[in-house]
Image: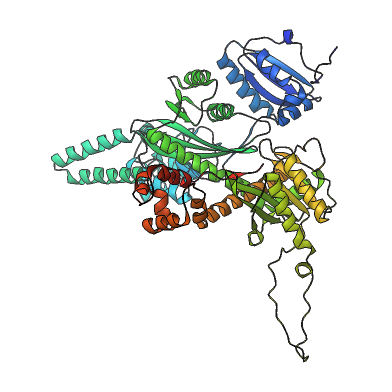
Amino acid sequence: MARSAPTVPYKPNPGEIPTNPGVYRFRDRDGRVLYVGKAKNLRARLSNYFAPLHTLHERTRRMVTTAASVEWTVVATDVDSLQLEYQWIKEFDPPFNVRYKDDKSYPFMAITLADEAPRVIVTRNRRIPGAKYFGPYPKVWAVHDTIDLMIKVFPIRTCSDSSYKKAMATGRPCFPGQIGRCGGPCSMKVTIEEHRAIVDDFIAFMSGGDQRFTKQLTARMREASAAMDYEAAAVYRDRLHSIDAVLNKSALVLAADTDADLFGIAEDELAATVQHFVIRGGRVRGVRATTIEKEIDISDGDLVDQVIQRTYGNASGADIPRQVLVPSMPDDAADLEEWLRTRRGRSVTIQVAQRGRKADLMRTATLNAQQALMLHKTRRTSDYVARSQALTDLQEALDLAEAPLRIECFDVSHLSGTNVVASMVVFEDGLPRKDQYRSFGVAETTDDTDSLYQVLTRRLAYLDRPEENETTPVPDVTSDETVVTERRRPRFAYRPQLLVVDGGKPQVEAAARALRDAGHEEIALCGIAKRLEEVWLPGEEYPVILPRTSEALYLLQRLRDEAHRFAITHQRKRRRRDIQSVLAEVPGLGEARIKALLRHFGSVSALRKATPEEIAELPGVGPKLAAAIHSHLAEPAPVTSG
């Protein structure tokens, strides 16, 4: 009788798991909740976790083998499962669920609605009870500029709480009120009720109601002018100018009646960054940035699902817009819309921005997210404490005798199997040494592993050159012999403690062979595979799995990404330089015609932009050959190993 493939011992019998919608929790032996998830059908979803262990994603396997039990709660509807999942994630903070880090570096404008007389302030504190927030803003001065303009139109309180209490107790206006900088009841110009109405207008304007106030002020200005009350007309005119100045700070990006939240997301295997554009009245009123650390594999749709839950889980109805624009649709979009509708009190649609200005804005948000992800990884790698931890973690994970203070990483790049190049990037003490980066051309090769072997053999040969590693004797200039000065070859500064290759087991074995053949097996070696971020060691059947939040894994990923970038950059530069050899690859195009082409179009860029019809105008180049030239010059994306 065949034995079944191994799975975890706490696997429930299939008949024990209901087919209802619900929420499940994995716990460890101490009862700690490790992971919370929801499902439309609990039995179908949980069966994915209890498949044979060798079929699971590496990180999912780590989660289920760390756990000691699973439990579930059945709910009435899919919408209820959304709410319960959100509550449990907040309550238990499970280590295998995605972890959020809100960007707290930007200032906000806040209106303290819980106060008797709400005031407007600049703050980075997002936890003021009852406060209404706008922003974030890129700079503190930008918030102050906006407030200065806004209080000219909607004069609300700006003074401190102590000034307000003193003014209300003594009956004397607060100092900001005396100089026209505070319009609260403490200025003795309005009542508490009248001030509250002005605060409501302030919030309505900032929330996107600019057209109503512009029309009202324009009408009042015209009425005052018709009545020859020019002083009042001038006041309304100045208020209109202030409104225009505020609106000019946030350009109209969508239709004027559009209220939407747009989420641009960039991610890799370890982390994701979210750029949340708050659009009210067609204008971007604020941008919120969030970094997400991923512990187990999660699909694009599931990530969007988590972002929406996180954003609106504690939001009031007024903070939820009519439209939510996302880069990819979550599987339970209809349930999310219903969940948002119950919180908002009106319908909410979730859409993918596919065309027009919404798609343009999504590309902008995604570009910002990509830059934020790159910055997040760079800052994490550059931080001294994180770097030290990364090197220590690498030493332990790879069982090294000492921390790898000098690491060299190699990547191979090619264009459809041609023009093969390789890159070497160098990190010392966890930081890039760009002055020591190198690139290699590979003339003939069979595949990526052969290319890697060739490049490492060439690099390791430098370690055995005396002139590269020993001090050159200083010639005796007092002797009668002729003094000959030889130009020193550019040298690799130090012997690396660790070599990293972009790729999995095949690439690591090719690199290990190069180390053996060069007689330098004392140098440690590992590879990082792109798909699962697995770390491979030579001679091992299974990879090393570093925790998603490991500083060592971030360092290896940064090395791999930098080698990938440098290889592609060199590949493209070489391709631009080598345009004649590229054209020589076109069947039927000889040296004379290549020279005629370049002479006719005047530059490589002009030739690349030319249509097949324009190329065919050259004598001796027919339509078929012109099409082949045009197709060959359409630059394919460089391919890298791993």
Residue 225 placement: quadrant: top left
Location of residue 551 in the rendering, given as x and y in whole percent from the top left corner: 71, 45
Count of labels in the image: 0
Location of residue 310 in the rendering, given as x and y in whole percent from the top left corner: 57, 29
Residue 418 to residue 198: above or below: below
Image quarter of the N terminus? top right
Q: Looking at the picture, tell me which residue is in the foreground, 515 or 398.
A: 515
Q: Looking at the picture, tell me which residue is in the foreground, 176 or 5.
A: 5
Residue 386 to residue 85: above or below: below
Residue 103 to residue 81: above or below: below
Q: Looking at the picture, tell me which residue is in the foreground, 514 or 501.
A: 514
Location of residue 482 in the rendering, given as x and y in whole percent from the top left corner: 74, 87
Image quarter of the C terminus? top right
Instruction: Locate residue 38 relative to residue 141 in the image: left or right.
Output: right
Instruction: Locate residue 121 relative to residue 12 in the image: left or right.
Output: left
Residue at the image point whose x is 37% and y is 57% from the top: 600
Q: Looking at the picture, tell me which residue is in the foreground, 518 or 390.
A: 518
Residue 279 in view, yes or no:
yes
Location of residue 224 in the rendering, given as x and y in whole percent from the top left corner: 18, 40
Instruction: Locate residue 68 relative to residue 597 in the image: left or right.
Output: right
Residue at the image point whose x is 44% and y is 55% from the top: 594
Residue 161 in view, yes or no:
no
Identify the colour scheme used: rainbow
Residue at the image point whose x is 77% and y is 83% from the top: 475
